[in-house]
Image (cartoon, grey):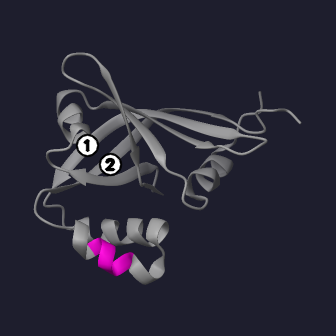
Amino acid sequence: MKEMNETEIIDFLMKGTRTGKLATVREDGHPHVAPIWFVWNEGKIIFCTGDSSVKAKNIRHNPQVSICVDDESPPYAFVIIQGTAKLFDKHKDLLKWNTILGGRYMGEKLAEVYGKRNAVEGSLLVEVTPTKMISEKDVTGW
């Protein structure tokens, strides 16, 4: 197993348009996994979601989450982040972060449009503070 160092992890997380797979736990104990658009900022994962989303409901109930980001092409690699999520409504930087997410995943030409469309009433900013990170690069060993 070839683990990544911290710099490699951050580079891996921010490369291209890789999505995260966010795992949360429903009130009834069942797991829920959903794709997220995210960025890494100052040691935290940042993403946005709707106030009434399953993600938000689950985080309110249990803020412990896990996020998997993987490279689905050989030689394969992944980062798994375990952490604590915090929800922010009416965050002063909601437009800023939605615009950054739009730029990353939709391209710079659509960043501002995406940001304005999504930084509306009922939108939440989510910060995940990692408590553990597991990584592997060159999974195939080739």
SS type, badge 2: strand
Res 86 label: 1
Residue under pointer 2: 127
Q: Nearer the viewer, residue 6 or 64?
A: 64
At label 1, which amino acid type do we have? Lys
Which label number is shown at residue 76?
none
Q: Position of residue 77 (x, y in %)?
A: 69, 40
Percent position (x, y) of residue 99?
35, 72
The single residue placed furthest to the bottom in the displayed view is 109
Q: Is residue 93 visible?
A: no
Marks 2 and 1 close (CB-CB < 8 Å) = yes
The CA distance from mark 2 to mark 1 is: 5 Å
Q: Nearer the viewer, residue 93 or 99?
A: 99
Residue 3 at what x, y percent from top left?
72, 34
- Dot 2 amino acid type: Glu
Q: Would you say 15 lies left or right of 26 here? A: right
Residue 118's image quarter? bottom left
Residues drawn in magenta: 111-115
At 29% across and 72% down in the image, what residue appears?
115
SS at mark 1 in the image = strand
